[in-house]
Image (cartoon, rainbow, N blue to C red):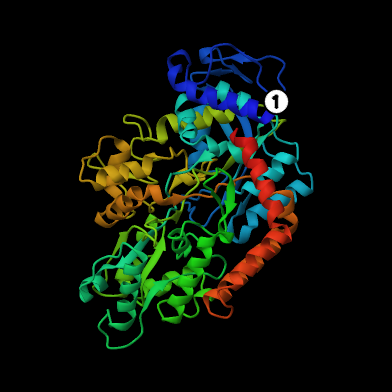
Amino acid sequence: MKTKVWRNHLLLSMSMVLAFGAACSNSGPADPAPVPGSTNNEQEVGEGGISYSAPFADGKYDPPIDMTTVAAVSPSMTFKNGETMENNVHTEWALERFGINLNYLWTSTTQNTAFNTRMRLALSANEKMPDVLAIDDVQLANDLIDSGKFMEVGEMWERYASDAYKQAVNEDPTMWYPFMREDGAYGIPIPEYSWNNDTVLFIRQDWLDNLGLEAPETLDELEAVMDAFVTQDPDGNGQADTYGLALGMRDSLKPAQATASWVFGAYGTIPQQWNLAEDGSLAYGSIQPGAKDALQKLNEWVSKGYIHREAGLHDETKAAELFTSGRAGIIAGPYWMDRTPLKDLMVNVEGASFQAYPVPTGPDGQAGRQGTLNFRGAVLINKDAPHPEAFFVYQNYLFDNFATLQEGSEFEYQFAEGYDYVLVDGEASYDTNDIPGGRVIPQKYTITYEGARIPSSAMEALGWLAEGNEPRNNLERYHSRFSDETRLQVANVNLNSREASMPERFTGAPTRTMKSRGEYLNTQELETFIKIIYGELPIDEFDRFVETWKSSAGDTITEEVNEWYNAVKE
């Protein structure tokens, strides 16, 4: 099968790049080759014998070239000095450093899925696609790939990606899975930090201390703690106004924040995703026997008042407010919640404190938490891009320098002085009050959203610091400046809980039957589960749900999912 042959060739090349790195420059092998997609009649040969589509020397195009793209502007992206997405410190850097003039065909906010909507309208209207396009929605990326407007990128990846770039992606070769076709790969994965959204428990430490309780390690111990949080007045105000656990179940049982997924994990499954079964196949988590046990446990907790009666109407934000207002003692979510939004707890409640703990184990001694995918989308390159190799010139540099904040490089402290840091008496300060005009984050302006990320680097750096070690490199020095005692404690718990992580295993585009029946099945599932949790349906209704799910296209979807999985993994 072409898919298997190509994938084996790709993974072999990525694993061999370390062994043969000395034989290759950061730009690729020494033999010149035509640049795919180039419209130039003559190829320029640059450093290391690599072919470029325009005059290229000393790491840049001269004269400068244009590279078109579009941008998704998130609420976290802020600007200063009159700059915009189209014209800012990052676009100036790309032009000065590489001779690449970034030309934005359009930009759109990410709020209310506006960017995705704009992208789909451009596709349906047959608008001109940009030369380079970063997409963080797998379904949308696959729809764009299937449009036939974007090139196969595996050949260019092998020739142009630097060793550092390859090593980052090679930490998890399954990143390629969603963007593979029979004749190769059509999207370059955008690596994300490992364990970034994995679940830990945040518990009111002052409540534990007030009641003389130890942190729970099992579900039974957790239940005892929640009972005390509800019945023993942990905040000492003389009122029965506290809850054990804050959950946000309005849209899902496994949102990133205020998730209930770890309860299912204690019974060996994660709902609403495809997990790896003992026989090596993919199995849908919500129909496993452990899901029934978890629903029964959640129903017990609701009936005992440990969970707010309106948790089924609460989204992540509303659930977090229950914790930060001082009314709930436990919430589950990613390690970074220690700052946003949980730091609001100390502002709202005098003397309050929290700590992170591993998710508890279930009756069989196992723990499970929803894991983080090591990528956040892909970069697509237009078939008609006049300079398709230019993206690698740009992105290689970021992986070679920015990803690890190389000492002595322009990114030694962060992206740009005067924006995300300033030197004060020779020392880097990241305090917004020290930076003229305040602190903004230019790396968010980059094509791949966050500059360049090596999956394992951030959490391992934090774990090293959490053990009381001195920083060994600039990345660890950077994290040491930003990480207080709470951040290090939370990160250490997160890192030490890696074995409990259960990431989504189906990362492909929705299957044929998913497209026609998936939304219906998902709606029925959430409605049924919420009703079971709140006692509106008996627990045995779960068995009927499983039978209906399987007969209403679930079995067909399972076959399609495993057909995809077998194709990409072998």
Q: Residue at x 21, y 71 (%)?
A: 209
Residue 301: where, in percent of width, then height?
Answer: 43, 76
- Depicted 325 relative to depicted 338: above or below: below
Q: Which residue is mark 1?
A: 37
- Depicted 368 relative to depicted 302: above or below: above
Residue sitting at the far right: 125
Label 1 neighbourhood size at 10 Å, few (<14), some (14-19), many (20+)?
some
Where's the N terminus, which quadrant? top right
Q: Is residue 385 left or right of residue 470?
A: right
Residue 434 seen from this side: no
Which residue is at the front of the view, 205 or 224?
224
Q: Residue at x 45, y 81 (%)?
A: 303
Residue 186: where, in percent of width, then height?
Answer: 65, 34
Residue 312 seen from this side: yes
Q: Identify the amino acid type marked 1.
A: Gly
Q: Residue at x 62, y 47 (%)?
A: 138
Which residue is at the front of the view, 400 or 456?
456
